[in-house]
Image: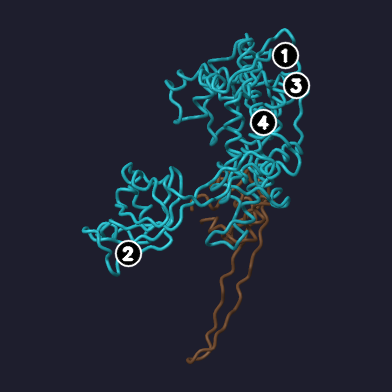
Amino acid sequence: MDIIKKPIITEKMTNLGEKLNRYGFIVDKRANKIQIKRAVEEMYDVRVDAVNTIIYGGKSKSRYTKTGIIHGKTAAYKKAVVTLAEGDNIDFYSNI
Amino acid sequence: MQVTRENKDDLNAIIRIQVEKKDYEKAVNDKLKDYKRNANMPGFRPGMVPMGMIKRMYYKPVLLEEINKLVSEQLTKYIDDEKLNILGEPLSNKDEQKDVDFDSQEDFEFVFDIGLAPEVDAEMSKKDKLTYYKIDANKKLIDKHADSYASQYGEMVDGEEVQEEDVVKGTLSQLTSEGEVIEGGITVENASLSMKVVKDEEVKKQLTGAKVGDVLQIDLKKAYPSDAELTRLLNISKEQLETESMLFQLTIEEISRWKKAEINQEFFDKAFGEGAVTSEEEFRNRLREEIERAYAQNSDYKLFLDLKSKMTGKFKSDLPEEFIRRWLLESNEGKLTEEELDKDFEKVKDNLKWQLIQDAIIKKFELKVEPEEIEELARQQVLMQFRQYGMANIPEEHLNNYAAEMLKKDQERRRLYEQRFQEKITQLAKETVKLEEKKIKEEEFSKLFEDK
């Protein structure tokens, strides 16, 4: 099971990172905070102070087409906001 | 941040400046934030570029700039606070300055060499003797001056016969080589030929003594070797000069002569105003005064030069030569080679010495130059410049504008200050030093300058 799926890179998260040293990730829904903490520490070589998680439910979407109504559903996912210990930081833009 | 000084000897010292991270951190961050606010990068909205990106792009140059600023500020402040009288500028010490790596280091140490100015004794007293050369306004000089006055107030008169410096007016018509007037050839009416411009002796002889109404044959090509002169006179193009015959017939219609004013009451009134000068003796006295006034400036300058060489001669302390040499080489990098410096080093040293002495004199005798004086001086110089172009009446407003324009340039202003100080020092020297007045002829005086 891959715990960290991808980092969340948005203006909102950039601001959080700069002001509060918090970084957001999309993580596997089954992962708990302890596992997330360990995974982030390992991957970015930083110390994690706290982890907050949110589970977003998928939304049902429907579209009207010539062939009838198409029903669908967006995926549910788990978001983790990781607060790093003071002095540590993650630079998502370092390899651009 | 720590600034320390080690004196190596009386003339050389080392200043160490230690810079820690906290000294520059805030300034650098503020600067980076400023960059972030204005950064415009594809992929991000303006001002929304992440700090990490900004840091990666600008951190090092900003750091360098801030540290540079900080160090030079501290250095100047230290020199000011400690009232150090330094020569030249501080130079980076080659032996003790460690390599600085801005990527990995956070604390830096900068080491500078400074050259200290020795104590200068700016003593001027009656014990010092200088000669003040006064130019003797002798008869010859006055005559010359009177002559120039006379010709300035002269007038044009008609002459009977052509003489050395006259202007001949008449009609020029082109001739064939056989001496016949070409019909439809080049004719110039009211052409004026100045005898001063005619170069050829033969033509000159031909013209001299000619009277109004005389008809002469002149080879203009011979008379005027300069093409520009000819094209203007005949009003033709340069190409025509090559092809056309230059043999012309001159019919003299008028002879004009610049006649000098006669030395009489009328002339005195014109030159100096009604009734100011009433006799030739008074006129000559007046000229003598004028000449002496004009030369007084030169006399002062000579005195200044003498004072300069005397004071630099008296200057016994040593200068940090090694340092000065390095400073000059480094500050004029590429423009000055070692050999050139070796050649001029004595002169440079003397100049430096004088600079020190001058500063000491200014300090000791509390000489001051007020900004108003400089403005006045600038105005005078502007006026002088206009006079050279023959414009004597400049509106006050114009003058002020030009002077202000002049003062805006740093270099000009420094020059004016320098000049004013020079005048003041000369004035001071006149009062404090024992002066021996000596009358001298103008030629001998000029020679004094040549010897230098």
- Amino acid type of disc 2? Ile
Chain rendered cyan: B
Contact flag, marks 4 and 3 (Cβ < 8 Å): no
In the rendering, which numbered label is found on residue B363?
3
Residue mark closest to the camera, 2 vs 1: 2
Q: Nearer the viewer, mark 2 or mark 4?
A: 4
Location of the N terminus of chain B by quadrant is top right
Task: Locate residue B97: give its quadrant.
Answer: top right
Q: Where is residue A81 in the image (x, y as percent from the top left)?
A: 65, 56
Q: Give the Cα separation between the discs numbered 3 and 2.
A: 75 Å
- Residue type, numbered disc 4: Arg
Q: Are marks 2 and 4 in contact (CB under 8 Å)?
A: no
Q: Distance between the residues labelled 1 and 4?
A: 33 Å
Residue B433 numbered tag? 1
Give the residue displayed 57% in from the left and 26% down from the top. Answer: B140
Residue B26 visible somewhere in the drawing: no
Q: In the rendered view, would you say B238 is above or below B132?
A: below
**Residue B16, position as x, y percentages in the image:** 63, 22
User: Counting residues from the N terminus, which is met first, the one under dot 4 or under dot 3?
Assistant: 4
2 or 4: tag closer to the N-terminus: 2
Q: Left or right of B91: which side holds A49?
A: right
- Spatial separation of the CA atoms under disc 1 and disc 3: 18 Å
Chain name for mark 2 = B
Mark drawn on residue B284 = 4
Chain letter of the brown region: A
Task: List the residue tagged with mark 2.
Answer: B186
Name the kind of residue labelled 3 in the image.
Lys
